[in-house]
Image (cartoon, grey):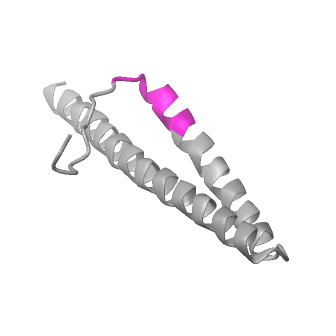
Amino acid sequence: MTNNVPMTVPLELPLEDLVWLRSFLCQERDAAAVDRQKAEALHVILASRAAVHVLTSECETMTRIIDEICRVVNIADAHDALAKRIAKLEN
C-alpha cells in the first residue's frame, strides 16, 4: 500500500479462541513491559535504547490488537445478551 493506510484482513475465530488470544496477548504485553524495564537498566546506552524502542513498539502493537479484540468480544456479548432478551420476550 502506498498511502500508509494499513490493510485490514477479516478474521473469523470462535469466540473462545478470541478470548484466549486476548488473554495470551495481555500476558505477553505484561512480559514485554517487564523486559522493557530491565532493558532500561542496561549499562550500555545504545543497547538499552534499542531494546526499549523495540519493546515499546511491541507493547503498543499488542495493546492495539487487544483493544480491537475487546471491542469485538463486547459486540459479541451484547449480541448474545440481546438474542437472549428477544428469546424471553417471544416465550
Residue 79 in percent (x, y) is at 25, 37
In the picture provided, is 23 more to the left or to the right than 30? left
| Residue 36 or residue 79, whichever sits in front | 36
| Residue 11 or residue 87, whichever sits in front | 11
Q: Which residues are magenta?
A: 12-21
- Position of residue 71 relative to residue 52, above or below, is above
- Position of residue 81 relative to residue 3, above or below, is above
- For the point 51% across and 51% down, the residue is 62
**Figure quadrant of residue 7:** top left
Please check the rendered image and state whether residue 24 is part of the magenta-colored stretch, yes or no. no
**Figure quadrant of residue 32:** bottom right
* Residue farthest toward the right in the current orientation of the protein: 43
- For the point 23% across and 37% down, the residue is 85
Please check the rendered image and state whether residue 20 is part of the magenta-colored stretch, yes or no. yes
Residue 58 in percent (x, y) is at 55, 54
In the picture provided, is 6 more to the left or to the right than 77? left
- For the point 62% across and 60% down, the residue is 55
- For the point 75% across and 61% down, the residue is 35
- Position of residue 61 relative to residue 43, above or below, is above
| Residue 75 or residue 9, whichever sits in front | 9
- Position of residue 4 relative to residue 82, above or below, is below
In the picture provided, is 86 more to the left or to the right than 72? left
Q: Quadrant of the N terminus?
A: top left
Residue 2 in percent (x, y) is at 18, 45
Q: Quadrant of the C terminus?
A: top left
> Of helix, strand and loop, which mostly describes the magenta segment?
helix
In the picture provided, is 22 more to the left or to the right than 81? right
Residue 46 in percent (x, y) is at 71, 72
Total number of numbered labels? Answer: 0
